[in-house]
Image (spheres, grey):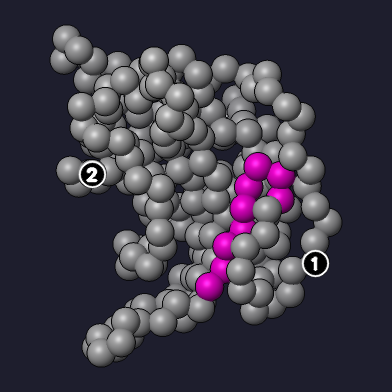
Amino acid sequence: MKQLFESTNWVGYAAAVVLILISAAAVIFASRPSRGPALPPIKDVRIVPGFVGQQAFGLWNLACENPKPPAGAAAVPAAPKRLCRANARMMVRAPNSNTPLLAAGFNIVMADTQASPGMLFRLPPAARAASSIDFFIDKNTMFRAPLRCSPKECFAQGAVPPDAVEQMRTGHTLSLVYTIKDGQQKDRKVRVDQLLHGFRQTYDAMRKAMGRE
């Protein structure tokens, strides 16, 4: 699944010296219910098969493209010619800073080369303290996914459990739990909560855009 995301631009992470502060901020802020402005509206937008572009539905966004290999690159038989994703991001602020930082990026992906949807959760490199992450929807069963890290980021990816898809379509909150090392090099759990406001509409629109409905 990694090749599905190579052409996508992602928000950069902060320097390594503040990674523990970023994760600490996620513990403090990301798990709190939002007290800010009202949730954005979920627009009634008709998405047609073959849709290319972006469309917001509440807190989630649909992005579809027809990827093309780089000029001069050898053809890759497994490379997708059609790719859509439903994505959302949880931003936090490190202590004593007004700069927003990414605590977690959530992506549910469909490609013409894959029969079922995939997932890609992006995390800061501080999440490398454990080899897997856990996620769950509301009070439902917890799912586990393997975690891989580079010096700049960590990500969990693979097929989405069918139960998870339906729970996300009908649920309220998607929760992600990963592990970091604190200042004393002890394991510390970080929980990031992402509201599912608009996910159902985004996911259903993604199916239409991919011609699967």
Task: Determine whether 86 is above or below 213 in the image.
Answer: above
What is the distance, in whole Å, between disc 2 and disc 1 at their CAs? 38 Å
Q: Nearer the viewer, mark 2 or mark 1?
A: 2
Does the image show residue 173? yes
Earlier residue among tags 2 and 1: 1
- Neighbour tally class for label 2: few under 14, some 14-19, many 20 plus, Cα within 10 Å: some
- Neighbour tally class for label 1: few under 14, some 14-19, many 20 plus, Cα within 10 Å: few
Say which amino acid is labelled 1: Arg
Does the image show residue 176? no
Residue 152 is tagged as 2
Residue 59, magenta (yes or no): yes
How far across and how far down the image is residue 166, in percent? 64, 47
| Residue at x 60% of width, y 25% of height | 139
> Which element carries disc 2, helix, strand or loop?
loop
Task: Determine whether 211 is above or below 184 in the image.
Answer: below
Quadrant holding the C terminus: bottom right
The magenta region covers 57-65
Residue 170, magenta (yes or no): no
| Residue at x 46% of width, y 81% of height | 81
Q: Are marks 2 and 1 in contact (CB under 8 Å)?
A: no
Task: Determine whether 187 is above or below 82 in the image.
Answer: above
Which of 149 and 53 lies nearest the eye of the viewer?
53
